[in-house]
Image (cartoon, rainbow, N blue to C red):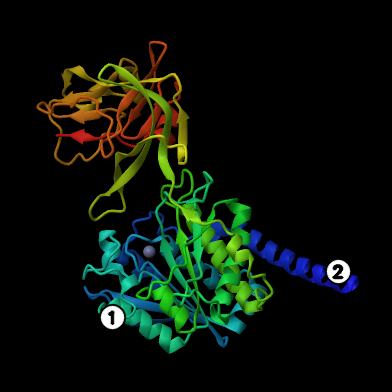
Amino acid sequence: MKTKLLSLWLLVTFFCHSQDEITSQLYETYEAYKETTLDKRRIKYHELQPLLTKLRVDPKFTVQVVGNSIEGRDLSLVSIGRGTTNVFLWSQMHGNEPTATQAIFDIFNFFGSEDFEAEKREILDNLTLHFLPMLNPDGAERFQRRNLLGVDINRDALRLQSPESQTLKKVRDSLNADFGFNLHDQSTYYNAERTEKPATISYLAPAYNYEKDINETRANSMKVIVFMNNILQKYAPGQVGRYNDDFEPRAFGDNIQKWGTSTILIESGGYPGDVEKQEIRKLNYVSILSAIYTIAKENYTNIPLEDYEKIPENDRKLFDLKIENATYELLGKPYVLDIGMNRLEVAIEDSNEFWYSSRIIDQGDLSTYYGYETFDATGYAIKQGKVYPEVVKSLSKIGALENALGLLKKGYTYIRMENIGNKMLKSPVPLHLISKTYEVPELNLEVGTNPTFLLEKDGDLKYAVINGFLIDLNSGSKQRVFEWAFKNAMIYR
Ligand SMILES: [Zn+2]
């Protein structure tokens, strides 16, 4: 009996090691396959077209237009492989969730290359892979969740009013796929429950009924998820969450599971300092390719099902910046407050760019919450910033950032400008720019307001919070202020 167990153990470690090595190699060689034309998160339909054109002339791939969006954009299905097991991957049914679309084009580069020959043969002999990237191109154009009909495609699996939904159903049915990867992004404010770790990736093996039964189809998706979680623990330890599996009868994941395709929902969340989600994109690439490899080798089948439940649940308890224990004076009395604030992104039309308009999300006892950045302000008093007394003609008068820091140290957080051009959307210096007539309201810490104030200790101003960015006034490090602590201040006309 003991020998049998030992040999089983050896067999398992052998498989794990070889799989581990492949995964490490995928991680280490990633840059060679990264599709560098898609390096910003707000990718558009037109950016994908030259890449699909290249795949059309590559005999390894088959590219078919399988449908159209409401506005007439092509929905393309890219297939590769000769195996009998069909694996179907679709991304971006929500237009503002593009991380996996980028990873799919990295995966195309991987299969288009001449490397990893043995592994690719294993995959392509056993599987046929079908990718439908950017299922909602009209939404992607506007960087919005819903399609042009204003419908959430993920609630249209039964009624099928949207052409994008009809296409997804039609392709699923025509392939009768064995495995399905339903690829999304989630808010960066999700964390693994009761930890400060962001849920960089969250998984779900969707339920196919209210009872949340586990049949073989669903069990297989759970096993593949456990496999992928084990991989991610190496690169983002503790940063994986498990989605609530309440049955949603209108959702695609739940129905595709019901229709007999083992469905794996992947949600790309946040990673510290990874604003464009390029590290998360890489983790998608590594973990999805590894999952495909394990499906091809069928060595996921012995993974214990109960490990699925061990993945921590998703929670939503993160802020971009959390300030703890600051003293705030109201009507002459001091109070101690935690303040949680988020840097909300405002998209710039027809571009891949955005700027930040930050908001206080909550204040009070936030001891059950966490921050990507946390500052203990015990002994610090919150002070209102002042308006610089002179009207400035142009930004060049404020000059270098050091100058702006000098103004902050003197307590100025607003600069009145002679003329703010209409084209200017954000202030590049850590000072809000205001028009000649704008009146700065009295500091009133409140949920929904822009977080802008100074932190004073022992009579000295030590820190500034400008548009939700914490700036150390004595760091003297210009670099740090630009690279991490600060992106933009606001303009008030
Ligand atoms: Zn989504």
Q: Are marks 1 and 2 in contact (CB under 8 Å)?
A: no
When asked about the image quadrant of residue 464, the answer is top left
Q: Quadrant of the N terminus?
A: bottom right
When asked about the image quadrant of residue 15, the answer is bottom right
Q: Is residue 139 above or below residue 86?
A: above
Q: Is mark 1 within 8 Å of ligand 1?
A: no
Q: Which mark is residue 6?
A: 2
Residue 282 locus on image (x, y percent): 52, 57
User: Type of residue at label 1?
Assistant: Arg
Q: Residue at x 86, y 69 (%)?
A: 6
Mark 2, Cα crowd under 10 Å, few <14 / some 14-19 / many 20+, is: few
Residue 274 locus on image (x, y percent): 46, 47
Q: Is residue 366 above or below residue 399?
A: below
Residue 236 locus on image (x, y percent): 57, 51
Mark 1, Cα crowd under 10 Å, few <14 / some 14-19 / many 20+, is: few
Q: CA distance from mark 1 to mark 2?
A: 53 Å
Q: Is residue 287 above or below residue 328?
A: below
Q: Quadrant of the C terminus?
A: top left
The reply to whether residue 317 is visible in this rendering is: yes
Depth order, front residue of 62/123: 123
Q: Is residue 225 left or right of residue 269?
A: right
Question: Tag 1's secondary structure?
Answer: loop
Q: Which mark is residue 159?
A: 1
User: Type of residue at label 2?
Assistant: Leu
The reply to whether residue 403 is visible in this rendering is: no
Query: Which residue is the extreme one toward the top?
Result: 459
Residue 376 locus on image (x, y percent): 47, 27
Q: Is residue 90 above or below residue 32?
A: below
Depth order, front residue of 328/331: 331
Q: Residue at x 47, y 87 (%)?
A: 176
Quadrant of the rendered image holding ligand 1: bottom left
Q: Which mark is residue 390?
A: none
